[in-house]
Amino acid sequence: MIKAISCAFALALTFGSASAAIPVTAPQRPIKANDFQARKGIKTETRHKAPAGSQNTWMEDFEGRPDSPAKSMQDWLPEGWQDISKKGNTPPTDNTRWNLTWQVTTNDFVSMHNPSGPACAYDGNAFAYIIADVAYGNHTDLDEQDEWLITPATVATGEDWLYLKLMYNPGWTVYNRENNSFDGLNTSLQVYASTDDGANWTLIWDLVEDEIKQKYTEDELRAELSRFDAEYRPIYINIKDYLDKPTKFAFRYYGRAGAPMAIDNIAVGVPQPVAKYVVPNGFFFEGVSPNFDYPSEPKMMIPFGTEAAWANKSTDIFRSEWNYADASGAAALWNEETLITPAYERLQTVDTPILTGYFESRASKPYTLRHSKMQAGGILSGSDSEGYVGEMSAAVYDIFDCKVAYTPKADGNGIFSLNKDIDDAWELRLGKEPGVLDILGFALYCPKTDHPFGFDFVQMSAYITETLPDDARLEVRVVSLNENGEPVSLLGVSELFGKDITETDPDVPAALRFQFPTPVYADSDIMIVISGLRDCEGALKFPYLWTMNPDVKANSYVIMSEWDSITQTEAEYFGDLSTLMIPQGYFAGLIMNFGASYSWMELEGDNSFVVPQEGGSKEFRIKACHKPERWRLTDNNVTVCDWASFEAEYDEASETYTVKVIAQPNTTATERKGDLFLSSPGSRVVFAVDQKSAVEGISADSSSSVKFNGNEIIVAGGKESVEVFDISGRLIATAALDGTVSAIDARSLPKGIYIVKVDGKASAKIIK
């Protein structure tokens, strides 16, 4: 589901300006367009495009059309083709009406002689296109159409099929306007064959019967009604009855009041299959090493103990063959379109699946990832070619699909530099008035995974071009988002100062590691936000990634605050960086990795932690993936708990830790009652805490050994000391005791509640 992400960003950034929530489209396919500018909603097929193969008997891609806007070009057809209207429609000679016949047009001129419907070539620049008559002005009696686009004769042989790419809207093809259902027929498409030069035609394929009714649910058809973009879909037509016979094919667009259609890459032959898949949700790629180098044996971090579905995005295949690892790790085969991998055990490492697609006897190249192994849980470790061996971070992108697009010496590409001039640069980029933008930071969006994961560090790649001041500050915050894309809670904060950042070779990116005080636990959509260094003149520059693969999701944003001089208000919002125009290819995101982990912590027995007011401890038995040095106690999920600690001892025989949780005395007026988390990256256990406050159970002047007369606190007995605390637990006064009667002057104490402890034990509550 595509979500709107809005930014009422007080939870994520503490800049103190007023803010309003402005919805911005969440991560989508990158668009090669001017930065943040509106563009026609053209969506071509994003899967790999199969080229014309050597086994095609005949193919037409319409690329022979001259690239000219002249009206005469409305009649242009490839050699041997015919355009026949059985309703007498003809191309217009002026601009008083639209062309309701087939025409071959180009990406640049598609809207010149017909309504501005979004369409483009599937591949290249030219394509066959037709529109339906629509109501406008006084024109409401819509014309019927019966328009035939006829190929020259060709002789199919062997395993040949007729196949093509068809742009159409299935919802508008069958939408019944009278009863709001999908049992109607507007303009549709049929394909006919003739072996006698067009004297007789035989229907061999029908869009409604052979495609829409077979592949779409009513909910899917209804969703298509709201689309204004165009999508090419592959069509395959069995022509085995016409092998070895000269045959013409006709594409009949007929009916009334429908939607435009386009055809491209029509062929008789056997398609060249191209295999491709998308990894399941929550699978993370091993990213760059701390040396900014590729990992030597890249792996993916995946959940353990759960099955996963692999989406097959292949083109021109009829049959799939998956090579994958079964539950034991042994090689196995799967022949369904969608692969379901088994629930792998904890820390099990298996081979990444390999997909081969087939059309008849023709096979695709096997498709797999450079990340050839998958690790179920734990944390990634590995090496690089520079000699690094150790812990590796993970990423939401495949580093092998991308290239670094910026170096400090490259002019004009340093868009990620948190310096005082960045506002001017983005105002110029977006065409804004000077002084209206304040760039707050950059962010990486991570959608919710099927299973919670965690991390205790974030690694950013940056060029350090000069020495930073010691007090220069960079901050990374992790914020959870709700279903509407709004910030909900702060999950983690980490910071680096200039004194922590060592100057390195300015031409080689360094790894800036942000270590979190407590592990981040992610069970929702999250944003990882980096901010700071506004006054450092661009001493740090963050490289970005580019790719030639349009399927790569960037998931990267700039966070900006814009001042509206008319309303005198300021609003904060996310800008989708995937819409940036870059020198080549597609923007592929920030080089931001994190120590992603799917892990486990299992508590044996009761989780209650009932502690007396004066403090205490309790032992628990815990099995865990990560060692205790990665554990933290927290009562707010962000900071280390300041009133409790733990000790852990490992028993190798049972593979279990004995964990002693130790609580300090509760000297406050508030009882401790709630959750205490023992957290590691990706997992945690919860203790149910119950500890009385310092004032509970003590009534005013209740102890015979403590009396209050308005001016003095009188203590009788006590052998060591008396201490007086205010309601916040702050020590106000103290005195030594010798077993006799002692007095503490209370005249200077302001009105309030005080706790008196005799020999370390709460003895009385004093109200002044």
Image (cartoon, rainbow, N blue to C red):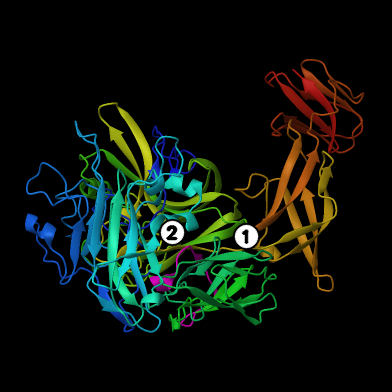
Give amino acid for label 2: Glu
Name the secondary structure under disc 2. helix
What span is colored magenta in the figure? Answer: 384-401
Q: Position of residue 85 (x, y in %)?
A: 20, 55
Mark 1 sits on what residue? 681
Is residue 130 visible in the rendered structure shown here?
yes
Q: Residue at x 58, y 64 (%)?
A: 309
How many numbered circles are shown? 2
Of residue 386 and residue 550, the one placed in the foreground of this image is: 550
According to the picture, the residue beneath numbered tag 2 turns out to be 211
Residue 585 occupies quadrant: bottom left
Up/down of 766 relative to 682, above or below = above
Q: Nearer the viewer, residue 430 or 9?
A: 430
Mark 1 → mark 2, Cα distance in angstroms: 48 Å
**Residue 93 falls within the magenta-colored stretch:** no
Q: Which amino acid is tagged 1?
A: Pro
**Residue found 55% across the figure and 53% down from its top:** 448
